Amino acid sequence: MTTVLVSSRNPVAAGEPAGEDPVDRRLSRTPARIYLAIGTVVIALMAFGPAWLQTPMMLVVVGGGLTALHVGLRRNAVPGASAPWRAMLCACWLFVTAMLVRIALPVTGASPPTNWALIPDAVVLPAYLLLGAAFAGMLRRRRAADDDPARVDAVLVGLAAAFMIWTFLIVPSIDQHGLSALRVANAFFPVIDVVILVLVSQLLLAGSGRQPALWLLIAASSLMFTGDMLFTLRDSQLASVPQHALDVLFMATFMLVGASGLHPSMRTLTEPQEVEYRDLSRIRIGLIAVMVLAPVVITALQPHTTLLNDVVRAGLCVLILLAVLARVVRSNNSRARAELATRRRATHDALTDLPNRELLTETVADWGDRAAGQDLEISLLFIDLDRFKMVNDHWGHQVGDELLCGVAARLSGQVREGDGRAVRKAVIGR
């Protein structure tokens, strides 16, 4: 039995930076704070001020939000990673276009709505799709692991919300007004809200960094979700909601989106984040339990209605149960992979990924036990790198690391497939 030990030392240089703050310290947060303070005052004036002040305040919010997003893109966005924010900016411009259409054609904003409402809806629908694409783009860049449990938790949130919206909003609207083109359009917006809610939930649950820009977007999405629910209830004549209240909610959403783009932490929403694996808190366990049990209980207690309603509710309940099963499977697989990764970090060199001294000790001890019983001998071959210290001194530790990796690659290339399990042929010690 023979093993090869490469002996060398390449200590990490003292004073090497441990890492950089994901938010550039040179980017000031002051503009975002000032904008947020002024925007809050403007929204308050719009909500509680005289009627003649509402339209000017709306114009201030719209102009300020668009300006904040434009400025934020120029000041804060990371080159090559600004596509999600540009999609969000385009969505805001479409929302403004729909608002101008409603102002130019008052009949499109009548309540109860008429088919004229489909004109601004044709502009608002692409805006929602762009908004969803923006959040999806942020999530794709931010997420660091495919088995992040936030994915399943966010899907559970979305499925539970979809169940509630279908049961208490869409079905009553269809029963009262029929499945007309206008009803389908109005019902489609809550569905998009559910998709956006799933994406925002993943942004919140995924990653270890929750920056102010993310919290501002979460607040904006919550207000938009609330506003759309109230808007659908009003247009379905299921509740009486003043238009003024809806305007305040949507303008507050617009203001918060602008503030998130102006804050320097907006760049962290398009940067990869490490996934945190931790025990579930009691609050998170309780929320998961509510999201799983509520649809099942409602389905069991509500009497039979129509075939379409029963099929949709049963389908959503099945999807919720499948999501819970997926979470259990992912959790088990993640734990197994984490244990394997921990074991490998303890027995392999971080730089070259070759077995380290600890694994050499274990291997030699195992060989010794077998050799004693089979009357065998153990041979160790030590290989050293001459003048390696000179490489570090003259060209730096980075070049020294590259040399070690090159030697490790050559040694690994000489090992036959399967030798790594039976006999540890190459062990590095630094």
Image (tube, helix red, strand yellow):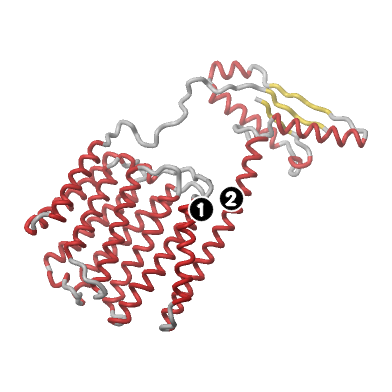
Q: Amino acid at mark 2?
A: Ser
Give the quarter of the figure containing the C terminus: top right
| Callout 1: SS | helix
424 up-or-down from 193: above or below:
above
Residue 81: image quadrant is top left
Q: Is residue 198 left or right of residue 176?
A: right
Q: Amino acid at mark 1?
A: Pro
Q: Position of residue 193 (x, y in %)?
A: 34, 63
What residue is drawn where x is 24% and y is 65%?
A: 123
Q: Residues within 10 Å of mark 1 (few under 14, many from 20)?
A: many
Which tag, 2 or 1, sits closer to the chain's start?
1
171 up-or-down from 141: above or below:
below
Q: Is residue 378 left or right of residue 78?
A: right
Q: Position of residue 234 (x, y in %)?
A: 23, 71
Q: Nearer the viewer, residue 238 or 115?
A: 238
Q: Which mark is residue 149?
A: 1
123 up-or-down from 141: above or below:
below
What residue is drawn where x is 20% and y is 72%?
A: 117
Q: Nearer the viewer, residue 271 or 59?
A: 59
Q: Is residue 147 left or right of residue 298?
A: right
Q: Which residue is mark 2?
A: 334
Give the quarter of the figure containing the N terminus: top right
Q: Nearer the viewer, residue 146 or 7?
A: 146
What residue is drawn where x is 43% and y is 78%?
A: 302
Label 2 and label 1: CA atoms lie apart by: 9 Å
Say whether residue 333 is visible.
yes
Q: Position of residue 9 (x, y in %)?
A: 63, 21
Q: Position of residue 41 (x, y in %)?
A: 17, 47
Residue 94: image quadrant is bottom left
Image marks 2 and 1: residues in contact by CB distance under 8 Å: yes
